[in-house]
Amino acid sequence: MSAATSDIILERMMALHPKIIDLTLDRMWRLLGALGDPQKDMPPVIHVAGTNGKGSTLAMIRAGLEGAGASAHVYTSPHLARFHERIRLAGTLISEPALTDVLDECYAANGTAAITYFEITTAAALLAFSRTPADYTLLEVGLGGRLDATNVVDEPALCVITPVSIDHQQFLGDTLGAIAGEKAGILKRGVPCVVGRQEDEALEVIEARAAKLGAPLLVHGQHWHVSVEGGRLIFQDEDGLLDLPLPALRGAHQIENAGTALAALRHLQRGEAAFEAAMRDVSWPARMQRLVGGPLVERAGRADVWLDGGHNPAAGEALASVLAEGPDRETHLICGMLNTKDIGGYLRPLAAQARSLHAVSIPGEAATLPAAQTAAAARAAGFEAFEAENIEAAMDRILDQNPDARILICGSLYLAGAILRENN
């Protein structure tokens, strides 16, 4: 089959619902029923929700499981370069023929009924998982939790909630408590949940929901602790202390994500091999990723080129912390954002860590914030900011100022995807 076959089916699926996001589980239940309820036949599920860090935490759990010899299906979103990245079958990206088959089957089972792109592609992932042996299934929530298309498993083996912060207010509510309530919607009666660091308002909501369901919680700061001492990661819970290498993912926020992953692996009764692998072998693209090949790296010469896809205020704070802790090198940002994001909240923490910001529009993305608006928001946040026609033009201007700069391309994951398609 040609590589375009799945793309053709995915394009058809986009036309099945007028909205990109429409939160309800009714359509999902209907389609899963027509498919024979594949969600009931999957390997034990670890369900991960949260605003920030859920992808990195899931990647560490996966690295730990695989490092200990277990196999895991993985479902994440969005993809960066190719849709296939969303679905791993027992550790391997789904093949084009296998993806085409499950997409075709879901499209036929759904008929012409309304269903969102995320819902029908999630159903395709669950169908693939139900037909392939593995030890675990790792499901990352797409948006929220309570009404997310992944929230269809009656008895997961474990739930995980990473830090909750303000994001997607138009869908989840405009207070931290309301958003936490949506995230806590993944909790199930009697099923344990690992909870990462939370603001008090969010934790109170999660704890209240867990109490109603009799769901045991393993909470950061109460049941487990994580810190850095002497260049090593120290994790401690009631089972004892772990002394491990720092995670391969950069940034102080990844220490807390690592703690969440280790708490999950502890609950799953994994041993030292899993804990070491979770730190050593984890990889997660577009999270402070240094580009090492491709046209942009060649263009950069002596300059370093980095890529990050964080896009909300908490992600901006985390990225600013990474830059502050890194080597003393003049940093210039190239930024593109979606028009649905709090760009001011994202940029303000970064202003003190960068010499300039060059704003670009995201190529091929209808919801891009125009470069002029991104530049204006950057100036309001305290940057020396410029507009650029594209990434290459921005990079050339930066290199004219400093051929030895650190260039960080940041903002939307859609921009990161466009970069990785050409430079990976």
Image (cartoon, rainbow, N blue to C red):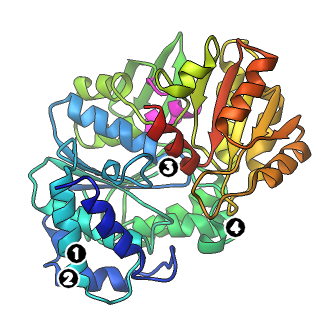
Q: Which residue is identified by label 3? A: 162
Give the extent of the magenta segment. 247-260
Mark 1–mark 2 contact, CB under 8 Å?
A: yes
Quadrant for the C terminus, please: top left
Q: Earlier in the sequence, mark 2 or mark 4?
A: 2
Q: Which residue is identified by label 1? A: 106
Label 3 residue SS: loop
The vertical placement of 350 against 199, above or below, is above
| Residue in the picture at 21% in, 45% down | 72
Q: Amino acid at mark 1?
A: Cys
Pointer 4 local density, CA inside 10 Å: few below 14, some 14–19, many at least 20: some
Between tags 2 and 3, which lies in front?
Answer: 2
Q: Which mark is residue 175?
A: 4
Q: Earlier in the sequence, mark 4 or mark 3?
A: 3
Using the image as rendered, state which of residue 361 and residue 382 is in the foreground.
361
Q: Amino acid at mark 3?
A: Thr
Quadrant for the N terminus, please: bottom left
Between tags 2 and 4, which lies in front?
Answer: 2
Q: Is residue 43 visible?
A: no
Q: Is residue 40 magenta?
A: no
Q: Which residue is identified by label 2? A: 109
| Residue in the picture at 40% in, 69% down | 118
Marks 1 and 4 sit apart, C-alpha to C-alpha, by: 36 Å
The vertical placement of 402 against 48, above or below, is above
Using the image as rendered, state which of residue 7 and residue 225 is in the foreground.
7
- Residue 140 locus on image (x, y percent): 38, 55
Q: Is residue 143 visible?
A: yes
Marks 4 and 3 sit apart, C-alpha to C-alpha, by: 17 Å
Using the image as rendered, state which of residue 290 and residue 370 is in the foreground.
370
Q: Amino acid at mark 2?
A: Ala
